[in-house]
Amino acid sequence: MTTSTPAGRPASPRLRAAVRDIPAYVPGRPPAPRPGLPTYKLSSNENPFPPLPEVLAAATDAAARMNRYPDMGCTALYAALSERLAVPASHLAAGTGSVAVLYHLLQAYCEAGDEVVYAWRSFEAYPIAVSVTGARSVQVPLTDRDGAARHDLDAMAAAVTDRTRVVIVCTPNNPTGPAVGREELERFLDRVPPHVLVVVDEAYREFVRPVEAVVDAVELHRTRPNVVAMRTFAKAYGLAGFRVGYVVAAEEVAAAVRACALPFGVSSVAQAAAVAALGCEERLLERVDAVVAERERVCAALRDQGWRPPEAQGNFVWLGVGDRAAELAAAAEGAGVMVRPFAGDGVRVSIGEPAGNDVLLSVAARFAPPPS
Ligand SMILES: *Cc1c(COP(=O)(O)O)cnc(C)c1O
């Protein structure tokens, strides 16, 4: 028996270079149980409300058929979305969370040497999803005028080259909060060539106020076939744990995304819960109103403390504390609240139960910038 390797062959499986360089996703941590101290998870932008009874019942029902594969065609979900959004089912592609759908879309359209343009700082899944394809991320800095932390759409349009395949616009932007305006998005789309896909990540669109101001990429895709609306059931619809999201796109684009998707990806339980959630959308959106009211209360209190947070249009607020991000996160954890620090940059705090938000406010008061 020999253990030597024939000359010229690697001794171990050879990883693709693109995969070796993938940055790790850092999930928001849950709080460790602390006897006598209530704890709150404000680190993952989750919906603080427990499921509505109908949604739970639909999921439980579906769970009773776990010996069967799910409907691979997501028929009931596509039918419900198709009616709700007034789009043909052929324009839909669902996956295990909108992050998975983004992976499939990038896989369908990008290869090594291609470029994907997006703002930075933005959703940390983007650089990972781009890296997997071997394409290159082109990160366009957010504007920092007065800490506004908004997309710089002019700079993003200017960053589009012959190698650009996809542009991602995150509105509202995770983790900083501002939303892109309707008109500025249209002006931007006018400048992007039609062969470049523009994915509008609308994960938090239900939280934008006033509602008349919210960008609607589903509407835009009707006249601009390079626009892709990406939406999720994870946030406003409270199904983060079930993993279901989708894109609305031109027929060829949706078909390409479905072609790259894992067979039977979206579980029967997730499909049933998503359909049920669409059926009680009004009550879910009332809960979104409650989160928005809490967001406004938290932002007003922060401003009273001397903070100037960027416009918060999602279910979270951004504290741009720079080098003190880890320190603030540790102080919050000590008080029972988990937040999401971004080293050297800032801290994202999800809007949760009022009591948890109050604890966060008491911690934030100790880090407030001195009055200028
Ligand atoms: C939470 C979030 C999503 C949704 O991800 P899922 O995979 O659907 O849970 C998408 N985009 C952004 C910017 C998010 O913050």
Image: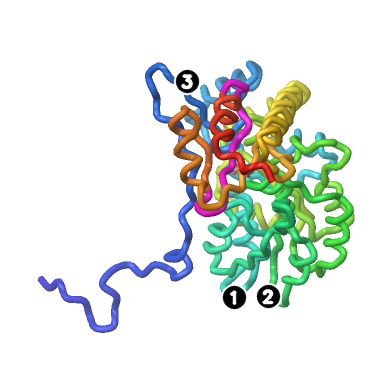
SS class, disc 2: loop
Residue 92, horizontal then vertical, whole percent: 73, 46
Looking at the picture, which amino acid does disc 3 mark? Pro
User: Is residue 345 highlighted in magenta?
Assistant: yes
Hey, which quadrant is residue 269 in on the image?
top right
Camera-near label (3 vs 2) is 3
Q: Give whichever of 196, 147 is nearer the camera.
A: 147
User: Image check: 44 left or right of 191?
Assistant: left
User: Image check: 326 left or right of 168?
Assistant: left
- Residue for badge 3: 38
Residue 77 seen in render = yes
Residue 210, horizontal then vertical, whole percent: 85, 36
**Can you name the residue that lies furthest to the front here?**
372
Residue range corresponding to the magenta coloring:
342-355
- Residue for badge 2: 163
User: Image check: 125 left or right of 189?
Assistant: left
Question: Looking at the image, which residue is at 47% across and 27% down?
Answer: 336
- Residue for badge 1: 113
Camera-near label (1 vs 3) is 3
| Picture layout, residue 272 above or below residue 143 | above
Q: Which is more N-terminal, label 3 or label 1? A: 3
